[in-house]
Image (spheres, rainbow, N blue to C red):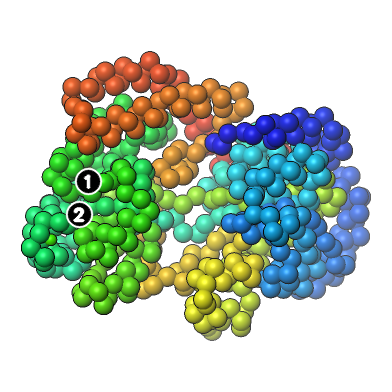
Amino acid sequence: MKKKTAAVLLTAACLLAGCSSAGSQKAETSQPAAGQTEAGTEGTEAAQEELEGSLISAEPKEFTIFLNFNNMPFDSSWQVWQEIAKRTNISLKGTISLTNSNEEEAFNLMLSSGQLADIIGYVDTTEMEKLGQDGGLIPLNDLIDQYAPHIKQAMEDDPRFLQAATSLDGNIYYIPKNQELLSAEYWWIRKDWLDKLGLEIPTTVDELHDVLYAFRTQDPNGNGLQDEIPLFDRAGWKMPEEYLYLWDTSTTFYPRDGKMTFEPLEENFKDGVRGMIQWYAEGIIDPEIFTRGASGRDTLLSGNLGGCTHDWVSAGNYNTSLAESIPGFEMVPFAPPADQHGVVKERVSRYPGAGWGISSQCEDPVTVIKFMDYFFTEEGDELINWGIEGDTYTKDADGTKHFTDKVLQSELTPIGYLRSIGAQYRIGMCQDGDYEKATMTDIGREASELYDSHPEWFGEDMPPYADGELELKYTAEVTTEYQNLMASIQPYVEEKFQSWVLGVADFEAEYDEFVEELKARGIDRALEINQEAYETYLNNSKMSTSK
Ligand code: CA
């Protein structure tokens, strides 16, 4: 949850008070095909059967769009969007100046002006839902039901996509950007070090310990010094959290059989902290674990010091970049080691993210939802994921797609090039897993295929986590209360956890007092709030019409 800015709060009130038209339009959309089709789409309806190819409108139509992704305001001149306009007869016009890269500032400015673009996409989904509940975005449930068969199908097929889209009031205010791949990060280990010491890939937490202990004590880099840093990560504060996953625990909330737990209160947490205290004392865990920055991976791998990490596919790129400086250097992906209960689990996963919605000031929401549906058709999906056939990608007879050298050999990265022509933008779509694999190195693809072929590792009914932090939706009534509780609880847990692992405080002596302090800081209430939010999340896996 992000803090609300004063500007946003102000405008919410303004929208509520000032937009009576928004209110009536909202009412109309919840009555299937009533006033809305009369408002000007009737002709389109009648003509629809005669529309050729992918045309969504017989006449060219233009809608305004507020969207700024990664400092790139929507630009109608992008090649992909020119092609989309040609195929659909729908073109979009960005409302954010191309020189404005401050998304939050632009968003607040739009809200305070009271002039909403027809289509709105914003990075913060909490703000998007709030805008919906305040009447600035219309509920899409009925529009999807009637006019967006491909979006509807995608929501029926993928509960996580529907859950991400569904607001606490049951309405869908935006179409999220979905992800086909589940996996995000992978376990990686120096295969050449394993070979040198005659060791196998570890398959359990205990085997991982023994392998890493050997890395620490048997000089696999061969310089005669005990300088290896067996377990490292560049992800800063969230990494210690990922090590705790080896004991099936963390410093935060986690659901088990429908019941939300706060893991520091549970037995697994004690196992995890004890394990990490030992590993740290033995020199297995990077001594700078809590302070090592984003460049840690580069430093430790290029220094021939790091042995094992949990990271994205890019961790495999070092096999190429370090081939000359460290002969034989080989990082390989491996399955998550089974935890102390023998269970293989990968807690880091992807979730659907921010997408786009239709504003209450849009005069033709039916055409817009049909346009939004286009990106879930095969043609629209290919355009937004792969760009232009024959130019940025080619297709084999069996349908397998390959990027051309224009993308793969671009001075930008492949993803950078695709974004520069408007592909892979942050809209309601499904990010194609094959598109990602086509940009990966062989070893990266191996990692991705290993993890994605094991959906059972990712667990069912998992709520979204962002960088290890639980991301449920909370009602306005409890939002502030929950934020206040966690502002007191979370830093306390992090501080104690660090002091135990670093050995500056005694875990065994302090644990009972720690639990009492958590109770005093209101952990039971925070758990209750999360239990309720989690149940709502689980209930939102079924499609419903507008409420
Ligand atoms: Ca050494």
- The residue depicted at 86 percent of the width and 50 percent of the height is 363
Q: Position of residue 358 (x, y in %)?
A: 74, 48
Query: Could you say whether the residue bearing mark 2 is in a helix, strand or loop?
Result: strand
Identified by mark 2, the residue type is Ile
Give how far across and how far down residue 141 sits, in percent: 70, 44
The residue carrying mark 1 has its beta carbon less than 8 Å from ligand 1: no
**Image quarter for residue 428?**
bottom right
Q: Quadrant of the N terminus?
A: top right
Q: For residue 269, which numbered disc appears in the image?
A: none
The residue labelled by disc 2 is 229
What amino acid type should be assigned to the residue bearing mark 1? Pro
Instruction: Say if mark 2 contacts mark 1, CB within 8 Å.
Output: yes
- Give the CA distance from mark 2 to mark 1: 8 Å
Say if residue 183 shows up in the picture.
Answer: yes
Q: Please, what secondary structure does the residue beneath circle 1 have?
A: loop
Dot placed on the residue nearer the N-terminal end, 2 or 1: 2
In the image shown, does 114 or 296 lie closer to the viewer? Answer: 296
Pointer 1 residue:
287
Q: Is 511 above or below relative to 61?
A: above
Q: Quadrant of the C terminus?
A: top right
Quadrant of ligand 1: it is bottom left
From the viewer's perspective, tell me whether residue 351 is left or right of residue 191.
right
Above or below, comparing residue 137 to residue 6 in the picture: below
